[in-house]
Amino acid sequence: MRHFPSRAALLGAVAGAGFGQLSARFAALPGGTANERVIAACESYVEFARSNPALFELMFRAELAAMGQEVFEQFRVLVTALPASDLVATSLWAALRGLALLPDVDAVLAVTLDAYVR
């Protein structure tokens, strides 16, 4: 018995669940200063990507990435509290996506956070 009308619908549901998990991580961030919250969000994002590489890849496929707009909005609100512009939030989001795939992510994340947040 088929539960989804198409492969695209199935992949969309899986990606949607992944974005839901990432959103829940952002919603559960500890209190603190704006800097501390952005750093925690970035670390949580990278940890999620590293722990769920296949799901993360699926979530950011071109045809599914728009589903993550609500999660990006949560992230944008955190970053613009620094204060920083929407463009800075978008740039940091893109940087995190790329660096999450690197083998030496901890060192690169530290440099990235120094450049954007600290």
Image (spheres, helix red, strand yellow):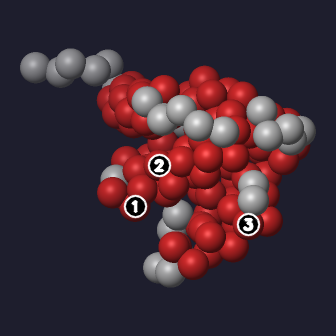
Residue pictured at 84% horizontal, 47% vertical: 88
In the picture as drawn, the residue positioned furthest to the left comes out as: 1
Q: Residue tagged by mark 1?
A: 50
Instruction: Give the number of callouts.
Output: 3
| Coordinates of residue 50 in the picture (x, y in percent) | 40, 61
Q: Would you say 65 lies left or right of 14 here? A: right
State the separation of the CA atoms marked 2 and 3.
17 Å
What type is the residue that disc 2 sits on?
A: Ser
Along the viewing direction, whichever of 61 and 29 lies nearer the viewer? 29
Q: Residues within 10 Å of mark 3 (few under 14, many from 20)?
A: few
| Position of residue 62 measured from the top left corner of the image (x, y, whole percent) | 61, 44
Q: Which residue is mark 2?
A: 44
CA gap between label 1 and label 2 equals 10 Å
> Residue at point 41% right, 50% down?
48
Q: Quadrant of the C terminus?
A: bottom right
16 or 36, which is in the foreground?
A: 36
- Looking at marks 3 and 1 on the same chain, the residue that comes earlier in the sequence is marked by 1
| Quadrant, the N terminus | top left
Image position, residue 103 (x, y; %): 47, 79
Dot 1, crowdedness within 10 Å: few (<14), some or many (≥20)?
A: some
Q: Are marks 3 and 1 in contact (CB under 8 Å)?
A: no
Q: Please name which of the two marks, 3 or 1, marks the residue nearer to the observer.
A: 3
For image coordinates 60% across by 56% down, the residue present is 97
Q: What SS does tag 1 mark? A: helix
Label 3 – label 1 distance at C-alpha: 21 Å
Amino acid type of the residue tagged 1 in the rendering: Arg
Q: Quadrant of residue 18?
A: top left
Q: Which residue is mark 3?
A: 114
User: How crowded is the residue under tag 2: few (<14 C-alpha within 10 Å), some, or many (20+)?
Assistant: some
Helix, strand or loop at mark 3 = helix
Between tags 1 and 2, which lies in front?
Answer: 2
Residue at left 51%, top 73%?
A: 106
